[in-house]
Image: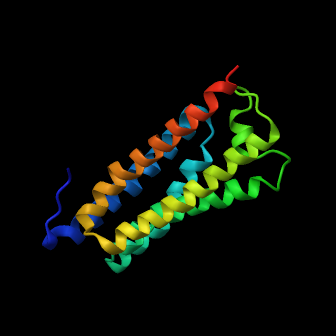
Amino acid sequence: MLTLHESSSTEAILAATIVAIVATFIQVVISWLRSHRVENMHLITLALLVVLGGATLLFKDEMFIKWKPTAVNWLFALVFFGSQFVGGKSLVQRMMEKNIELPSAIWTRLNWSWVVFFLVMGFVNLYVIYNFSTEFWVNFKLFGLLGLTLAFVVGQSFFLVRFMK
């Protein structure tokens, strides 16, 4: 587990923020050079990193970068929510319909489950930010958010397996 001493916590977050911004920028450039396209998720992540990471660096305040997972999750919740009403098909259906045939009501339920999941993940991140140490938050961000996402996907897989082609 990553360990941050209280005296070096801010410096470590600032250094990690610089690394994250540079690494994400390199990822976007490499993606563009290889395929002349970049996933929207990578662009959103880069934009939020530049804005919130930049504010973290400018003000030397780790709170901005800590809010990034919440901002990303709530943005995804908004996109999944909006997809229910725009384009005729939910985002989940557009991503998965080639592999799974589902009734319309099930597509809607799946999409709503992602909306709720992303909203909850944003709130959980905020809870951790304001109730635990930076060291705990770093480990939660690296391992907890991923673990919760994997558990959610596995849970949905058990639900969806009966519909697989």
The residue at the point 48 percent across, 66 percent down is: 123
Q: How many marks?
A: 0
At which x and y percent is residue 100?
71, 28
The residue nearer to you, when weighing 124 against 91, is: 124
The residue nearer to you, when weighing 86 against 157, is: 157
| Side (left or right) of 77 relative to 90 | left
The residue at the point 63 percent across, 50 percent down is: 113
Q: Give the vertical position of 162 relative to 26 (above or below).
A: above
Residue 111 in view (yes/no) = yes
* Residue reaching furthest to the bottom: 59
* Residue reaching furthest to the top: 165
Q: Give the vertical position of 12 relative to 164 (above or below).
A: below
Tell me which corner region of the image, top left, top right, bottom left or bottom right, holds residue 139: bottom left
| Side (left or right) of 40 relative to 56 | right
Q: Looking at the figure, which quarter contains the C terminus?
A: top right
The residue nearer to you, when weighing 114 against 109, is: 109
Q: Give the vertical position of 90 relative to 48 (above or below).
A: above
| Side (left or right) of 2 relative to 25 | left
**Colour mode?**
rainbow
At which x and y percent is residue 164?
67, 23
The residue at the point 44 percent across, 46 percent down is: 26
Q: Give the vertical position of 147 relative to 125 (above or below).
A: above
At which x and y percent is residue 32?
57, 40
At which x and y percent is residue 7?
13, 73
The residue nearer to you, when weighing 71 against 14, is: 71
The residue at the point 82 percent across, 56 percent down is: 85
Residue 53 in view (yes/no) = no
